[in-house]
Image (cartoon, helix red, strand yellow):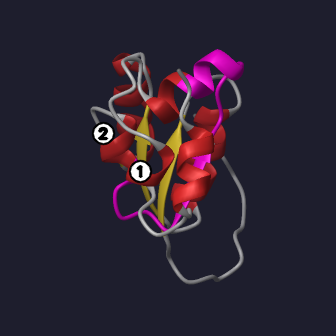
Amino acid sequence: MKMDKTYACVPSLKVAFVGLGVMGFPMAGHLKLAGHDVCVYNRTTAKAEKWVETFGGRMAATPAEAVRGAGIVFACVGNDDDLRSVVLGEYREYTLGELFPGAFTKDDIEKARVY
């Protein structure tokens, strides 16, 4: 995938990108080409492997692993159920507060739990 683009000089950030579909794959690629430290997660591992091969970033085995330590997190998934799956885990093994410590109050975390 050839992407000819000039990027503004900005400080490099640690970025997590979840979802490498038709839009997410090139969006995450632009972030990497702009000089950011990008870690990707995709439920289909082959797509994440292809992205790493194309752009040279890193891939994670889980969404929680991808976002750990990231300053910015992007989620580019198809629908609400997909977003719940990657944010809350298919078996509800983590919550938004556990993924982003300090970013939410206790009340926010309780509201975010989906049963």
At 50% from the left edge and 76% from the top edge, which residue is drawn?
Answer: 12
Give the residues in magenta: 67-84
At 63% from the left edge and 82% from the top edge, which residue is drawn?
Answer: 10
44 lies left or right of 114 = left
Quick check: 72 above or below 1? below
- Amino acid type indicated by mark 2: Ala
Q: Secondary structure at mark 2?
A: loop
Which residue is nearer to you in this view: 99 or 67? 99
Quick check: 1 above or below 43? below
Task: Tell me if residue 79 is in the magenta stretch.
Answer: yes
Residue 73 appears at what percent x and percent y? 55, 54
Q: Do callouts 1 and 2 mark residues in contact (Cβ within 8 Å)?
A: no
Residue 23 in which image quadrant:
top right
Residue 7 appears at what percent x and percent y? 69, 70
Q: How far is mark 1 from mark 2, CA to CA?
A: 14 Å
At 40% from the left edge and 25% from the top edge, which residue is drawn?
Answer: 92
What residue would you read off at disc 2?
A: 60
Quadrant of the rendering where the N terminus is positioned: top right
- Amino acid type indicated by mark 1: Leu
Residue 49 appears at what percent x and percent y? 34, 28
Which residue is nearer to you in this view: 55 or 47? 47
Q: Specify the label residue 33 is tagged with.
A: none
Quick check: 13 above or below 20? below
Quick check: 109 above or below 90? below
At 36% from the left edge and 18% from the top edge, which residue is drawn?
Answer: 91
61 lies left or right of 82 = left
- Numbered marks: total: 2
How many C-alpha atoms fall within 10 Å of the one at disc 1: few (<14), some, or many (≥20)? some
Q: Secondary structure at mark 1?
A: helix
